[in-house]
Amino acid sequence: MLLKRAARGQLALIPAVQAVLNRTAAATIDPAGTDDETRLVHNAKKIALFTIGIAYQRYAAELEKQQEVLMNISDIVMEVFAMESSQLRSHKLAASGKGGNAADMCAVFLREAMDRVEVSARNVIGACSAGHALRENMATLRGFANYDPLDGVALRRNIAGRLLAAARYTVLTVTRLPL
C-alpha cells in the first residue's frame, strides 16, 4: 500500500528511499550530539527505507507478488513505529520527571527491536541481492545496525526492582483524580 501511494505521488517515499540508496556510506554517520536512542531509531528508519529500495530495485512492479519480502519489510516498518513511539514516550516522561523506568525500558526495548529489524533486513537483502551487491548491501546494513550493547541484565533488574517496590506494574506513577 505504501509503494502504491508513493507511485501515485501521495507519499514522498521514493525520494526518501533514493536518498538512502544514493548516499548509503554517508548515511551511516549521524550528527554530533545525537543520543544513542535517537540514533537507533534514526538508523532503523534508514534500514526500512534501504530494504524497500533494494526490494523495489529487484522486483519493481512484481514486488507485490513477493509476500515473504513484503512480510519482512512490514515487520521492519512496525518495529520502527514501535521504536519511535517508545523513544518519544520515554523522552516525554523524562521531561516531566516521571521517566525512570521508562528510560530503562526504552533502552532495552530499542536494542532488542534493532536486533529484530536487522534479522528481517537480512532476509530481504538475501532475497533481493547476490554476489557483490549482496556483500555491499550487508556492509551497509551492518553500518546502520551497529550499536554499542548495554547491560540489559542490570537494567531489567532495576526495572523489576522498581516495579516490585511499587507493588504494581507501572511505568510512571499516575495520580488518580477524584470522581
Image (cartoon, helix red, strand yellow):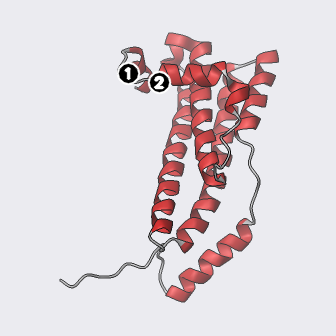
Badge 1, how many Cα within 10 Å: few under 14, some, many 20+?
A: few
Q: Nearer the viewer, residue 122 or 162?
A: 162
Q: Quadrant of the C terminus?
A: bottom left
Q: Above or below — where is 82 with respect to 156?
A: above
State the residue position of label 1: 5
Q: Above or below — where is 136 with respect to 44?
A: above
Total marks in image? 2
Q: Residue 8 at what x, y percent from top left?
A: 36, 15
Q: Quadrant of residue 142?
A: top right
Q: Above or below — where is 72 with respect to 155?
A: above
Q: Residue at x 60, y 14 (%)?
A: 57
Q: Residue at x 37, y 78 (%)?
A: 174
Question: Which residue type does callout 1 highlight?
Answer: Arg
**First in sequence: mark 1 or mark 2?**
1
State the residue position of label 2: 13
Q: Residue 25 at what x, y percent from top left?
A: 73, 27
Looking at the image, do the residues carrying marks 1 and 2 touch, with CB atoms under 8 Å apart? yes
* Residue at the farthest left position: 179
Q: Residue 18 at what x, y percent from top left?
A: 57, 19
Badge 2, how many Cα within 10 Å: few under 14, some, many 20+?
A: some
Q: Residue at x 73, y 70 (%)?
A: 153
Q: Secondary structure at mark 1?
A: helix
Question: Which residue type does callout 2 highlight?
Answer: Leu
Can you tell which mark lies on residue 84?
none
Q: Residue at x 56, y 17 (%)?
A: 56
Q: Secondary structure at mark 2?
A: helix
Q: Residue 120 at what x, y percent from top left?
A: 64, 37
Q: Above or below — where is 172 with respect to 178?
A: above
Q: Is residue 27 left or right of residue 162?
A: right
Cα–Cα gap, marks 1 and 2: 9 Å
